Image (spheres, rainbow, N blue to C red):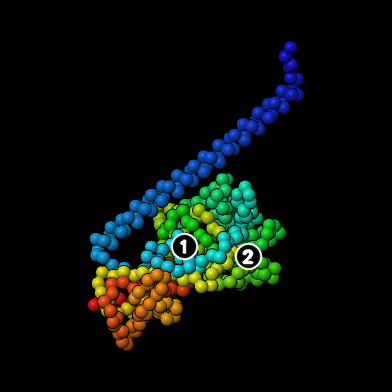
């Protein structure tokens, strides 16, 4: 004999079915939104790549840039030795151990996101923006990506002080863009928990040196701070075919790491001709931007030989007032560069051929 449901049971079944349908619709909506975001990222990435390819072709057509002959990009150079770590376009001091992440912590089942902060772009807070704080290994991580009408934007991360969920100490900012090379960092401001407690509106740390053609990057801070709020000022440099400025970060991590104090890189710098002399003055590109300096100011030493992990035959650089010819016929030399921050490249004012 079949049991027939009464009207109350039928209504409950109908209610449960409606809830299940609503849950399916919500999941489909999320999937559709994420797919739309992915397609938007792919479309803009393809358009940016085409633009960058055209620019390379134009540069080649207009003649080889002589400055490139004296420039060494560390992430692509022949780094033959040293103690260091690499992330994207940056080389920085070596971590002693894996750094801690302010907004994520590891468990036996994987990374867990601390959902205790708001993320705003141009003062607008969205749940999707929080995805940039989530660890990349978290399956539910979404895509933080938008197209803006204006190239000037600010990204603001603010922790809820009443919901700390662990320490907020950090000394590294790690940024991984969806579209590397499409924007420049104009500066950033960091406010600590002391700022919050004392209602102090002066940032504990602020940098306003421009970093152009920004890619995957780690900022090594001069000291450890207790994060409350961070504001990053950005200028978008790529306008797509719709007349909009796309921007998004795959992740924005705030890390606390310990470094090897003796971190350095040894870079092999090859040449096509014998080298007569090398200038003391250089142009350094690091996390503070691009600026003129010298080998002596940066603690950089040059050598003719690097064999069995031993540098020998130090090279005396040349100042504008006089030249120091190299006494041997060499077509390469080695630069020993100490690391206390993230560096990208260096360029000698002059490498004179013999």
Mark 1 element type:
strand
> As rendered, which of 311 and 125 lies closer to the eye?
311
State the residue at coordinates (24%, 77%): 354
Camera sees residue 52: yes
Query: Where does residue 251 sit, x and y in percent of width and height?
Result: 52, 55
Label 2 neighbour load within 10 Å: few <14, some 14-19, many 20+: many
**Mark 1 or 2, closer to the camera:** 1
Vertical arrangement, residue 304 with respect to residue 79, above or below: below
> As rendered, which of 82 and 6 lies closer to the eye?
82
Determine the CA span between mark 1 and mark 2: 22 Å
Camera sees residue 185: no
Chain-order first, disc 1 or disc 2: 1
> As rendered, which of 114 and 12 lies closer to the eye?
114
State the residue at coordinates (60%, 51%): 111
Query: Where does residue 96 sit, x and y in percent of width and height?
Result: 56, 65
Q: Residue furthest top?
A: 1
Mark 2 element type:
strand
Q: Which image quadrant is residue 348 in?
A: bottom left
Q: Are marks 1 and 2 in contact (CB under 8 Å)?
A: no
State the residue at coordinates (27%, 59%): 58
Query: Where does residue 329 sit, x and y in percent of width and height?
Result: 26, 76
Query: Where does residue 99 sit, x and y in percent of width and height?
Result: 58, 61
Which of the numbered marks, if any, corresponds to residue 48? none
Q: Residue furthest bottom?
A: 321
Which residue lies under the disc numbered 1?
Answer: 86
Which residue lies under the disc numbered 2?
Answer: 169
Label 1 neighbour load within 10 Å: few <14, some 14-19, many 20+: some
In this picture, residue 177 sits left or right of residue 165: left
**Which quadrant is the N terminus positioned in?**
top right
């Amino acid at each position: 004999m079949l049991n027939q449901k009464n009207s109350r049971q039928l209504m409950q079944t109908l209610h449960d079915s409606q809830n299940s349908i609503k849950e399916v619709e919500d999941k489909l909506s999320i999937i559709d939104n994420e797919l739309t975001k992915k397609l938007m990222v792919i479309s803009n990435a393809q358009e940016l790549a085409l633009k960058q390819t055209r620019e390379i072709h134009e540069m080649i057509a207009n003649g080889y840039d002589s400055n490139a002959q004296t420039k060494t990009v560390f992430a692509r150079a022949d780094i033959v030795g040293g103690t260091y770590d690499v992330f994207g376009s940056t080389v920085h001091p070596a971590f002693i151990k894996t750094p801690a992440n302010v907004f994520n912590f590891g468990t036996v089942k994987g990374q867990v996101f601390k959902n205790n902060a708001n993320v705003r772009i141009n003062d607008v807070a969205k749940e999707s923006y929080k995805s940039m704080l989530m660890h990349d290994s978290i399956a539910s991580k979404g895509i933080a990506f938008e197209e803006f009408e204006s190239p000037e934007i600010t990204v603001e991360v603010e922790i809820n002080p009443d919901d700390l969920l662990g320490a907020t100490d950090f000394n590294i900012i790690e940024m991984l863009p969806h579209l590397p090379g499409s924007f420049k960092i104009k500066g950033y401001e960091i406010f600590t928990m002391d700022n919050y407690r004392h209602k102090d509106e002066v940032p504990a740390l602020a940098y306003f040196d421009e970093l152009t053609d920004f890619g995957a990057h780690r900022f090594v801070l001069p000291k450890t701070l207790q994060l409350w709020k961070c504001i990053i000022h950005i200028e978008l440099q790529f306008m797509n075919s719709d007349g909009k400025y796309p921007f998004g970060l795959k992740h924005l991590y705030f890390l606390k790491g310990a470094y090897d104090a003796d971190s350095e890189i040894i870079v092999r710098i090859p040449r096509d001709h014998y080298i007569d002399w090398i200038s003391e003055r250089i142009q350094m590109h690091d996390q503070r931007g691009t600026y003129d300096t010298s080998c002596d100011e940066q603690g950089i030493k040059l050598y003719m030989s690097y064999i069995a992990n031993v540098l020998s035959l130090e090279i005396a650089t040349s100042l504008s007032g006089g030249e120091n010819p190299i006494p041997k016929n060499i077509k390469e030399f080695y630069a020993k560069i100490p690391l206390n921050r993230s560096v990208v490249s260096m360029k000698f004012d002059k490498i004179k051929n013999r």
